[in-house]
Amino acid sequence: MQIRITARRAVQASLYALFGLLVACANPDMASPSAKKPAPDAPVQSPNDRFAYRLITLDNGLKILLISNPDTPKAAASLDVQVGSGDNPDGRGGLAHFLEHMLFLGTEKYPDAAEYVQFVTEHGGSRNAYTSFEHTNYFFDIDADHLPGALDRFAQFFISPSFDTAYVDRERNAVQAEYQMGLKSDGRRGLDVFQASMNPAHPLSQFAVGSLDSLADRPDAKVRDDLLQFYDDHYSADIMRLVILGREPLDALEDMAAKMFSAVPNRGVELETIKEPLFVDAQLPMLVKIKPQGTLRQLEVNFQIPDYRGNYTVKPMTYVSNLIGHEGEGSLLSLLKREGLADALSSGTGLSWRGGELLSVTINLTEKGVEEYERVLQNVFAYLDLLRSEEPREWLYQEQAAVAALGFRFREPSAPMGYVSRLSNAMHYYDDPDVLQGPYLMSDFDAAMISDALQWLMPDKAQVVLTAPEVSTDRTSRFYEVPYSKLGPEALMLSRWEGSDIEGLHLPEPNPFIAENVELVALTDDNPRLPDLRVEEPRKRLWFKQSEDFRVPKGAMYVSFRSPLVAATAEQKAASALYTRMVKDAVREYTYPALLAGLGFNFYTHGQGISMRVSGYNNKQLALLEDLLAKIADQTFDPARFERLRRELVLGLQNTVARRPTSQLLDDLRRALGNGAYDEQELIDALEAMDVEGLEAYRKEFWASVKAEGMLYGNYAPPEVQKMSEVLDAVLGEGEGAPALAPEVLQLVEGEPLELHAAIEHDDAVVAWYLQGDGQAWRDRALVALTGQITESGFFQQLRTEQQLGYIVSSFYWPQHDVPGLMLLVQSPSHSAGHVVGAMEQFLSDTLRDITEEQFQRHKQALINATLKPQENLGERAEFYWQSIASREWSFDAPQQMAAAVESLSFDEWQEAYRDLFLENRRSLLALSVGAKAAPEIEGNAVFDNPEALKKGRDRITVDLSPL
């Protein structure tokens, strides 16, 4: 649960033709013969979408979208209420968020606070919710056979929640823990200052998360009474939207929905437009400076604009934002990078309310950029002047529209829970026929509307937020105690922001990467059932498979350049990280248009080498891969860019303090357990000792050492394997190559419990308890994985809901390579690490006593179902194949092996193994950060204060990655 605050004429002619073709394809009447004409009560769907849809409205006014997929292993549902933190009553900051928490904790029909979570978890599902300014969105998924039971429990949230007094008192602590968890988050801290700087009469200025103080009982207002009143005032069927996805036919889903949700009351809620501006004219322009928790250096330029969400067939701000955020030649970011002022830029409307939106231009600054932030602003406004100086270009709009239409035409399925959650929110904003295609529609070019929108993006209408450690501040924000300063129009010289003609800025050229051929390659008679090794040479192996399950004009090309020179030392780790960053930076202007056209590219380091991935529409993939490898092979390092990127990496490593404490602690555990991982200071020292000549020498050594392993999966013809092989030959050269570094995992020993103390700058106590399995066989893995499944909901219910130890409370399967392990993780603002460890101990003991054979069998089936869950789309299938190749599981049957091992386990066998592994003969590594409280004294534990000292002299398990 969370707060959310997703020759030009010829070119024009070809774009119009392409757009017309794609729009025609998006119309089911003109699609392929297999696409069905939608029923009158169904939305327009992609020709590639094989689900069945139906829109209904119950007598109580609840609008529902039903989705039938007979093959889905997971059912899912989401209900979105158009009420959020912007509707909090005065003086009750966080009430909408608190209400979201409370609905999970019992209803009149199902009074047990654990009932919903336990039912969903025992049947292979998950659940969550979020509260944003305008919305509260609830969602779950579950093994498809159990949709009715989950849906009935879910429906009761909106019919008869109990608001049990005992849990009202307890759950306030969970909200407080969530609030405290964000105290060091620069995102939450920035939002606090943003709210403090805006018009206090605007509802967005309210405290959204909530705390013990804002949710306290008062003499004239008990918080439970306020919860009930808020629920009665706002939770109404007419402002709710529900989406249900299951394998049942539409008629059965409709009967289910009517039976379970007809009792949701309709209170006749009228949603009012917010007339107060986010900023009043007298406040603008405004300059806010924020001192961050870490090393964040960022400039935000914010503009309040009209609410354009109703103009979704025009999408004027999509056109504008795509141009501001462009990263190709002639773009704003290209200029800022060339001047050494910035490294990244994004633009978009992430914040909306009934009556307006906020367009934000967010720029990641260099240290020079902080010093010269007014120069950055001049460039921003110069680019906006450029956009205003010319009429909106229809060919550019149609190019964006063509890519969007292509995305809808070949839209692939995604995870059911995320899909229904997005759709339940979208139903508030799109007409019924457009619920599915609305986000992709750009069918109505309107130059006047775009020009009007650009008039809001003027210097005198801007709120500028500069975040950097160097800034001076003179005040502190209310809820997160953030140092900041604020200057209004009376103190600002607007002329220092205003743009002028700047050489080098221009609008994008036509995109050469837009797919011109979206035909499907014919499947060959000998297409293998699984990826087939088509090229096997001493220094190169290539796998190939055509996709027959996902018939879209897409594919994924992977190449792993395996080398021992990426992680054996901190110096290698630092050099490989800087090298990959230099490569991506050098080709960014070239690859950005490809990204816009639906072609993904990544170049990244890992423990066994550096990998490249090119994915998306396959029409121009091989040419892109060849061009990229040629650029990489011929690359030289610009000394100035080297210094900036090296400094950027150092600053990122120094910014660890701003990351979540649980993430920091798990990273320390990985360093203690594995090889090839180093602490931040070691990497900083290596980077600061490096010069451009050293990186050039590293680049040559790396390419001389590599062996390549690659895969093509998707809409490819077999000859493309040989073409890829020839492309790779150009960078591999003549050498022998060398074997990659083999991963290692620390082998823990029975009766020798280890304890790692981490120095994390946070007041909360954080505990991560890792219990290692015995062996690496499938049965060994199955025993621990099943334990993770069994303990998940009970650990959350006991340590969070009942004991209120903290907001982050979880138990899960945590394998390191093929070595199984169980993880218990808690971050607590209210209890010491010693208390948390004691609660974990008690839970482990109670679990063996409390679990029944009936529950065991349910959990067992849930894990089998989750393990055998098929991939949703081509990208997921490609990643599964690639990870199987990387881990040398060339039979590609790891899920089947794991499922068979789980199936073979009896209740008695599991109990015996649990008693041995998690109670009597533990292989234990306890990592903790004590926060503001005293360190625990745990008898028998060998205590260490750094990962290297802990693993020194201990045995390790080596993971075999031969033959490469």
Image (cartoon, rainbow, N blue to C red):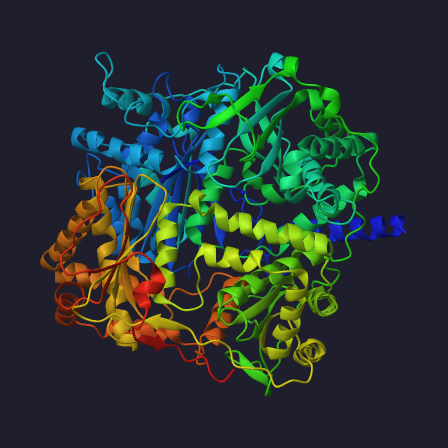
Query: Which corner quadrant of the image does residue 254 belong to?
Result: top left
Please indicate whether residue 210 sits to the left or right of residue 880 in the image.
left
User: Residue sitting at 32 percent across and 62 percent down?
Assistant: 814
Please indicate whether residue 1 sits to the left or right of residue 725 in the image.
left
In this rendering, the answer to whether 932 lies above or below 22 is above
Q: Which residue is the extreme one toward the front?
A: 689
Please indicate whether residue 529 sits to the left or right of residue 587 in the image.
left
Q: Is residue 30 visible?
A: no
Camera-nearest residue between 768 and 51:
768
- Residue 607 location in percent, x, y? 48, 69
In this rendering, the answer to whether 140 lies above or below 950 is above
Camera-nearest residue between 491 and 503:
491
- Residue 729 location in percent, x, y? 69, 80
In this rendering, the answer to whether 502 lies above or below 17 is above
Q: Which residue is the extreme one toward the left?
A: 849
User: Residue sitting at 22 percent across and 67 percent down?
Assistant: 923
In this rendering, the answer to whether 843 lies above or below 906 is above
- Residue 335 location in percent, x, y? 75, 43
